[in-house]
Amino acid sequence: MSKVPNNIGQTFSEETQTGKIKDYSTLNLGPTHPATHGIFQNVLTMDGEIIIKAEPTIGYIHRAFEKLAEHRPYNQIAPITDRLNYCSSPINNMGWHMTVEKLIRCEIPKRAQYLRVIIMELARISDHIVCDTVIAVDAGAMTGFLYLFQWREKIYEIYEEVCGARLTTNIGRIGGMERDFSPKAWDLLHTFLKEFPAKLTEFEGLTVRNRIFMDRTINCGSISAQRALEYGFTGPNLRAAGVDYDVRVMNPYSSYEDFQFEIPVGTNGDTYDRFMVRIHEMRESLRIIEQAVAKMPEGPFHADVPDFYLPPKEKVYNQMEALIYHFKIVMGETDIPKGEVYHAVEGGNGELGFYLISNGGRTPFRLHFRRPCFIFYQAYPEMISNGMLSDAILTMSSMNVIAGELDA
């Protein structure tokens, strides 16, 4: 059996098991290609339009985040997490904050937890809007993408009002939120909760029972529950295969146990199921947000941890103690206990975990990000083998492979 040639685009022949000579060609899908949704590469061995095998290559935007974190104070690591899954960066931010809070044994006020839930569920909706509309685009339906994407902008306007940023948010702080929601933020949130459900229903009407969309996505890129578990799938891609695992339910954090919501699951683990799971998850996220708004507790929006929370500027300018705390926090001179913790949150793509080892220094001794994209992307060659090239694009879209999360 001959090996795949190094020269992309070269045609070569090999003898099959039946003794026939078969002509194959190699196709370079990526690393910079409009269909790859990020900077990563697949070298495909093709029999006409049929994919015989795929060899993925990653690392094109590897930024050494884990090594960078070992040289940064704990409060300065949050902006690094923004650049993982940048479609839902607030979840990354708050997952990191909760990891540090677990290490320092910090008790978070109930109001801060509920505010976090609202932001994280908005981020989940934003993430799923991107994924599902792009699936539609790759199936040939541009209208839904253009129509629904404006609602991601509405979410970004809420982020902007809460923290001043839109995409890479650095939202919240160790111990809770940087500030409470302003009246304008509440108004924007109420408007979104009122108007978005009807628009999501319209998007469903364009896609869910559309014959072309169904033909393109059903039985496309299927994976069984057993294989998904063997690869370590989590999140919507695992639930689409029929496994109802969700970190918010299995290991509740930030008071998720206070809310009633369902875990949507599929049956075939194909592109259509992955699309539908995300559609239903958006509805469940809306349900969680509505409960959080209705049951919002009174009280502080941040824990009493002066070693991690910057004092107000007026105090910094007028009080020596506040100035000292400000200096200590900014310069990373806060005492951190020794310890080893792991904390996971339900990110847009699945279980986003932070494994942190502290030796008591001003920076982590070791920090590892468990990125769900890095886990499930390993199954991609198996999922697209013996399928059409056009189906490989749809499968990639439905897995929601984010290059920033793939290469930490």
Image (cartoon, rainbow, N blue to C red):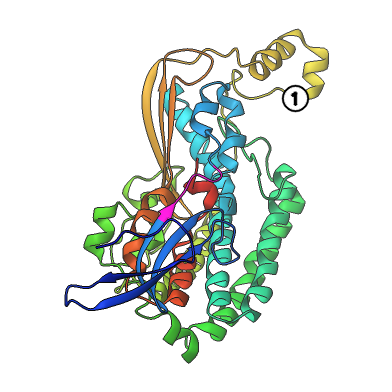
Residue 49, relative to residue 11: is it above or below? below
Where residue 104 sits in the image (x, y, percent)? 45, 22
| Residue marked by disc 1 | 312
Q: Residues within 10 Å of mark 1 (few under 14, many from 20)?
A: few
Taking the view exactly as shown, the residue that stands out farthest to the top is 320
Q: Nearer the viewer, residue 106 or 12?
A: 12
Q: Residue furthest bottom?
A: 211
Instruction: Residue 141 in the image: state x and y as whole percent.
Output: 59, 81
Q: Looking at the rendering, in which quadrant would you find the N terminus?
A: bottom left
Q: Which residues are magenta?
A: 56-61
Q: Is residue 8 among what the camera can see?
A: yes
Question: Which sits in the foreground, 86 or 283?
Answer: 86
Q: Predominant secondary structure in magenta?
A: loop
Q: Is residue 163 left or right of residue 175?
A: right
Q: Residue at x 42, y 87 (%)?
A: 215
Q: Residue drawn at (63%, 79%), measured in percent from left and top?
A: 142
In which quarter of the view is residue 379 placed? bottom left
Q: Residue at x 66, y 15 (%)?
A: 331
Q: Secondary structure at mark 1?
A: loop
Q: How many marks?
A: 1
Residue 58 forms part of the magenta stretch: yes
**In the image, what residue type sits under mark 1?**
Pro
